[in-house]
Image (cartoon, coloured by chain):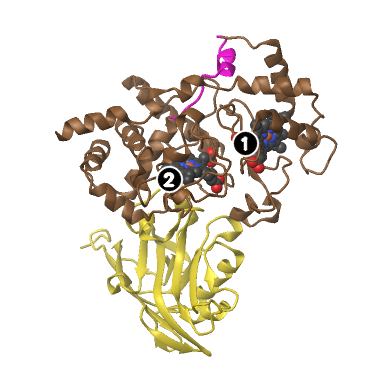
Amino acid sequence: MKIKTAIACVVVSIVLMAFAEKGGSLFHVPAGWPVPHYDFAKNKLTQEKVDLGRLLFYDPILSRDSTISCESCHSRFVAFTHVDHALSHGINDRIGKRNAPALMNLAWQRSFMWDGAINHLDMQALAPITNALEMDEQLPNVLEKLRTQSRYRFMFERAYGDTTISTEGMLRAISSFMVTLVSSNSKYDQVKRGEANFTRQEENGYALFLMHCNACHTEPLFTNGEFSRNGLAQDAVLQDLGRFAVTLQPEDSFLFKVPTLRNIAYSKPYMHDGRMKRLSDVLKHYASLHGQGVHMNNTLDQLPSFSSEQQVDITSFLLTLSDSTFVMNPAFSYPREIIASLTKESN
Amino acid sequence: MSTSVMRAQHLDVSIDSKLGKHAFIPGSTCAVAGDTIQCTALRLYLGSFMLLNEGDTIMRWPFFYFLIDFSDPSTTVFQLPDLPDIDFDEVSFLIGVDSSLQVDGPHGGVLDPAEGMYWTWQNGYIDVKVEGTASLSTDIKEEFAWHLGGYQGPLNASVRCVLPCSKKRLHLTIDWFHLFHAMDMKTQHHVMSPSAATVQAMEALKSGITAR
């Protein structure tokens, strides 16, 4: 295990050095962050792949009737979650089972979806494309449709050196775009870099956070990547068993992936089923767990009944995790300039 | 012609499929043990072949996988390349896809998810796919569909078969009777995700494979 990690470190730093040399800033590991989990040696990041992935991410061609793109449920302005939707809806307005998670810092994530059903970022896009409630398309059809478009033949050739449009090429391009979605410039990050200061309230909130929340929402990613319970009552209608559905191990019932809290102010509503509309609802929920002692989890069972001042303090700290440069980053936006240059190309 | 490398040849593999006494491929109808079974799809992965001699592994093809589709006879014969000129007495192979190939991102060739042997909503390969109708199935349309797979921990479904083999030609016969015997058409006419029952079903399938 140790050796593996060491090798991974070496590989990653070689890859990253390669970028640094090219002067490219497609991806970098912010100071003090752990080594990414994503294997860049298998999918070398290039601008060409990122461009192709961005085009695909914003293109409804991936859905059966060309109405839904990835962006429909993962919009940049709300940190790539589904604007104000508790349960995301897809093709023909069919309602899904879960709240669309915000997308960021995916290179550090080990498994995907609220229950970890997806084991590799490269395989993620297949799930929404083929889900009848989301994009409802068949993979061979998607490839067929992409092959008929000269813009994709051109973009695949640019990215991979030949015009073959394969599942692998498509998936690796979408991942390439997604791993560039790094958010590391919130006020919290600036404070850590010594470029800004917390207010007294934020400072208090941070101290409470470290004591009571950080075990699960561990900085700097604000998730420990584990599956856990956070004291939510089960929704009787949705009957979502969480991680159990993947492992069939009874002890995994009702466990959900600990979500990152970065950009949390943008990504409402909250929880796997979007049941909470406001951060204040979330804080009330955690304060209400005090003294219940039924969660089989020490951190949760030891939560104090946060006073309303403490709840406000924690919330004000959570607001320092908003990264406006992330949600405004033009490199993550609708690929207008790529499409414009492609149109010129074909004229 | 002194070195084994220069004499490298192939291991030729061919496979046929039956259910009890009957040939069993998509399109065929078989009456077995009180049930009448019509097959519409029959596909499985074989791979990670090895040759052994007196228990020692002497040759491995860890990254060679084959998708056998009994509706396409060309997929039922294949070759394993670069066979050195050495003695062996057993062949070993996986039915299904090794778990290490299920967690490292996309693969091409027969392991392309577009082949339809991959679960997209909960990652993992479908090792074996059997579909059709059965008179004993309690499904309203008397259909059954078994998608057998799973790679995680106790749900790892792929099974390793070890069979006698000492020639450069290996002929495998799969008798699906063992699988049908292990499955209950009343409660298990549709199996679409990994489970402990799938792991048992794969063991049963394995016991129906013989080499000649």
* Quadrant of res A139: bottom left
**Residue located farthest toward the left when viewing the structure as drawn:** A347
Q: Is residue A227 above or below residue B110?
A: above
Say which of marks 1 and 2 sits in front: 1
Q: Quick one: B159 or A347, which is closer to the camera?
A: A347
Which lettered chain is shown in yellow?
B
- In the depicted view, which residue is nearer to us: A7 or A12? A12
Is residue A185 inside the magenta stretch? yes
Question: Residue B16 is drawn in which quadrant?
Answer: bottom left
Q: Chain of mark 1?
A: A
Q: Earlier in the sequence, mark 1 or mark 2?
A: 2
Q: Total of numbered circles in the picture?
A: 2
The chain letter under disc 2 is: A
Q: Could you say which disc has been placed on residue A270 in the image?
A: 1
In this picture, is A311 found above or below B6? above
Q: Is residue A221 visible?
A: yes
> Nearest the camera: B183 or B48?
B183
